Image: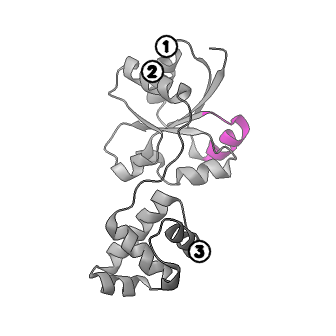
């Protein structure tokens, strides 16, 4: 392959970083430019300067920023993010990543996952399907109900409503009531006369 793939590795441990670099160098058919980031303070400046195609990072250490926001801040929306898992991490966090590799994966498994990620054609990002309850909550939100009013109407706690709203925003990548209104109308979750 003639295409050069730029890979950034964000990991505080020199041993783990070196191991990942060693595995990456074993990958056949991939020309790589690998750079390491040991300190999160260097993250954004390094990503802005280098514009990597792939960012490998440990979500349990660096789970302090949403990946979509990071891609936007470093002007690199196509950057793929790979979770380097060396401890238990919740599934919601891992869903944000394009791929997951583990320190327990073999070199062949890591190579296979990364090769597939690098050379797989871009998939159209389809939002995850909403649950029935989430659709109910969207309908209530666009009717102007507060979290407490929604909780009372649906016999839920306010905390549960807030969690559902957070999940809806994550799934749809819509963060405003106006955006949810348009989504609900287009997807026939409500009728115009209900708003």
Whichever of labels 2 and 3 marks the residue nearer the N terminus, that label is 2
Distance from disc 2 to disc 3, alpha carbons, whole Å, reads 43 Å
Q: Which residues are magenta?
A: 41-53
Residue at the disc numbered 2: 111
Distance from disc 1 to disc 3, alpha carbons, whole Å, reads 49 Å
Q: Main secondary structure of the magenta part?
A: helix
Residue at (51, 22) in percent of width and height: 21
174 sits to left or right of 110: right
Instruction: Check whether the beta carbons of the residues at disc 1 and disc 2 lie within 8 A of each other.
Output: yes
Q: How far across and down, in percent of the image, does residue 151 sit?
A: 33, 82
Q: Nearer the viewer, residue 182 or 171?
A: 182
* Numbered disc 3: secondary structure: helix
For residue 26, which numbered disc appears in the image?
A: 1
Whichever of labels 1 and 3 marks the residue nearer the N terminus, that label is 1
Give above or below for 92 relative to 122: below
Residue at the disc numbered 3: 178
Q: How far across and down, in percent of the image, does residue 52 sit?
A: 64, 34
């Amino acid at each position: 392959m003639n295409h050069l793939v730029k890979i950034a590795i964000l990991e505080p441990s020199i041993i783990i970083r070196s191991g990942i670099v060693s595995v990456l160098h074993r990958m056949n058919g991939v020309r790589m430019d690998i750079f390491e980031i040991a300190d999160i303070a260097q993250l954004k400046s390094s990503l802005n300067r280098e514009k990597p195609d792939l960012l490998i990072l440990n979500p349990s250490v660096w789970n302090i920023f949403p990946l979509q926001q990071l891609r936007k801040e470093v002007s690199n929306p196509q950057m793929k993010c790979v979770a380097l898992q060396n401890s238990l991490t919740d599934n919601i966090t891992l869903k944000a990543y394009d791929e997951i590799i583990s320190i327990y994966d073999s070199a062949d498994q890591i190579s296979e996952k990364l090769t597939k990620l690098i050379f797989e054609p871009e998939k159209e990002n389809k939002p995850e399907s909403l649950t029935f309850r989430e659709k109910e909550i969207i309908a209530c939100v666009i009717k102007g109900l507060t979290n407490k009013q929604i909780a009372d109407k649906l016999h839920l706690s306010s905390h549960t409503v807030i969690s559902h709203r957070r999940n809806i925003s994550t799934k749809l990548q819509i963060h405003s009531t106006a955006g949810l209104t348009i989504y609900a109308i287009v997807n026939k979750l409500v009728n115009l006369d209900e708003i």
